[in-house]
């Protein structure tokens, strides 16, 4: 089991300088964690090498971006499709897992039986495709890295939900379903569809980090032989510490369906770190991103960042600006103290504490726990003037910017292969 390793001190500036290179291994989307890393690298004068996961044609063919699609992407940009996973890769009979799932009715999702021999063929085909494209990516990358440059590879790969239509209603009922609509995450995970998701998550979220480090080894050795430096960072989630009842304590969102894949990612980092490679998985606090909308309730533990900013901010002026921005979004009669009292009561309740046990992570959901979390989320929404404009948006921006600072500078020489960035460090790095 990975040991909890929270980073406490703001990292000193790393030696990265103008002309050094940050390689984005995966596609950069708006309003996500990686934007903070890019901003920090740009502040240091580094060159950002961008990538894409590619796009799928109607017939399922994976292709690079067109000239029109890539017109606004800053250079250097390597247009090799890095989509991972295997749900659209075909077996020896020309059938993909997605095509099989299209035949599954929502009413019979838990009875669906999949052909695991076929799925294994698709998995191997997906791995072969991804490794071939990664080799091409690294060849193109070598051309744009200047002599004398230090390089950080930032692994941005996550996700892996098969595209079949049956999945979204299933996930909505697992992550947002109350009463009769609730599907326990254990029930979904134990089904054949859940097991397929798990295998795909591991290929996307975890194994891509292994392929990146192994395939870039010749380039890494070449750069290091020239007296320069290479490191690898990845984004994890394994719960994080927030202020609860006056103390920073570890807590988590449940059910985190990708948790098993994130733990596999951590294990890969541990194995390479033991070989002397500079690599670290950074477990970041919960934020609201474009991809987290299905996980209602994940944002509840973001509100206590207000308290961490009051207690530990590294920049009072910046904190005051964020407080003012948040205040404008709340109803006039709502105070920060009111929000913080509610989240503190929520986090210290026996029901929530029962689902925040580090040694049991990731835990599965239960109906009473899910309804409690969703009700808490709805209550906090109701304190805003507009539930489409939440204070968790400016707070998320604080998180991803601080995490970008920590990850760029700590990963030059990480102290451990897996580390946690809590609300205390987020506040200190503002």
Image: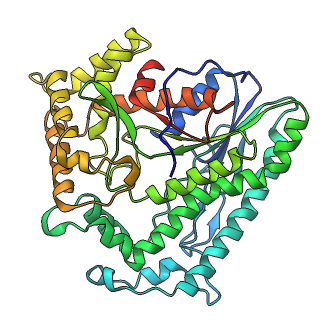
Name the side, left or right, on which 381 lies relative to 191.
Answer: left
Q: Residue furthest bottom?
A: 93
Q: Quick check: can you spot residue 103?
A: yes
Question: At 17% across and 42% down in the image, what residue appears?
Answer: 349
Q: Residue 70: horizontal and vertical position, in percent?
A: 63, 48
Question: At 46% across and 46% down in the image, what residue appears?
Answer: 237
Q: Residue furthest right?
A: 226
How many numbered marks are there? 0
Q: Residue 365: horizontal and vertical position, in percent?
A: 27, 60
Question: At 25% across and 82% down in the image, what residue appears?
Answer: 107
Q: Nearer the viewer, residue 86 or 425?
A: 425
Q: How is colour applied across the structure in the image? A: rainbow
Q: Quick check: can you spot residue 65?
A: no
Q: Nearer the viewer, residue 3 or 159?
A: 3
171 relative to 53, above or below: below
Q: Nearer the viewer, residue 374 or 356?
A: 356
């Amino acid at each position: 089991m990975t040991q909890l390793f929270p980073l406490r001190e703001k990292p000193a500036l790393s030696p990265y300088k103008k002309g050094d290179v940050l390689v984005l291994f995966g596609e950069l989307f708006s309003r996500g964690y990686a934007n903070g890393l890019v901003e920090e690298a740009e502040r240091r004068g580094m060159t950002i090498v961008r990538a894409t996961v590619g796009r799928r044609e109607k017939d399922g063919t994976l292709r690079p971006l067109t000239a029109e699609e890539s017109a606004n992407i800053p250079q250097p940009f390597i247009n090799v499709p890095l989509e991972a996973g295997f749900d659209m890769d075909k077996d020896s009979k020309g059938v993909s897992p997605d095509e099989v799932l299209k035949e599954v009715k929502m009413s019979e999702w838990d009875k669906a039986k999949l052909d695991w021999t076929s799925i294994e063929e698709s998995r191997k085909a997906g791995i072969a495709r991804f490794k071939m494209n990664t080799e091409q990516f690294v060849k193109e990358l070598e051309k744009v890295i200047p002599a004398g440059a230090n390089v950080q590879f930032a692994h941005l790969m996550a996700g892996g939900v098969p595209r079949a239509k049956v999945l979204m209603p299933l996930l909505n009922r697992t992550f947002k379903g109350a009463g009769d609509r609730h599907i326990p995450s254990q029930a979904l995970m134990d089904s054949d569809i859940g097991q397929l998701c798990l295998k795909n998550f591991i290929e996307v979220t975890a194994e891509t980090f292994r392929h990146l480090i192994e395939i870039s080894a010749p380039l890494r050795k070449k750069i290091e032989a020239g007296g320069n430096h290479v490191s690898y960072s990845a984004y994890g989630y394994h719960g994080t510490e927030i202020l609860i009842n006056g103390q920073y304590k570890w807590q988590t969102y449940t059910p985190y369906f990708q948790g098993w894949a994130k733990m596999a990612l951590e294990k890969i980092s541990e194995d390479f770190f033991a070989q002397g490679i500079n690599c670290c998985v950074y477990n970041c606090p919960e934020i609201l991103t474009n991809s987290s909308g299905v996980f209602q309730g994940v944002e509840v533990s973001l509100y206590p960042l207000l308290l961490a900013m009051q207690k530990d901010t590294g920049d009072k002026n910046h904190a005051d600006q964020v407080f003012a921005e948040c205040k404008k979004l709340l109803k006039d009669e709502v105070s920060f103290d009111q929000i913080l009292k509610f989240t503190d009561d929520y986090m210290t309740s026996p029901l929530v504490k029962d689902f925040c046990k580090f040694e049991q992570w990731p835990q599965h959901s239960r109906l009473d726990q899910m309804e409690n979390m969703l009700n808490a989320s709805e209550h906090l929404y109701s304190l805003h003037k507009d539930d489409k404009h939440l204070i968790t948006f400016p707070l998320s921006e604080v998180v991803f910017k601080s995490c970008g600072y920590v990850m760029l500078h700590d990963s030059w020489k990480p102290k451990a292969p897996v580390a946690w960035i809590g609300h205390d460090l987020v506040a200190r790095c503002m």
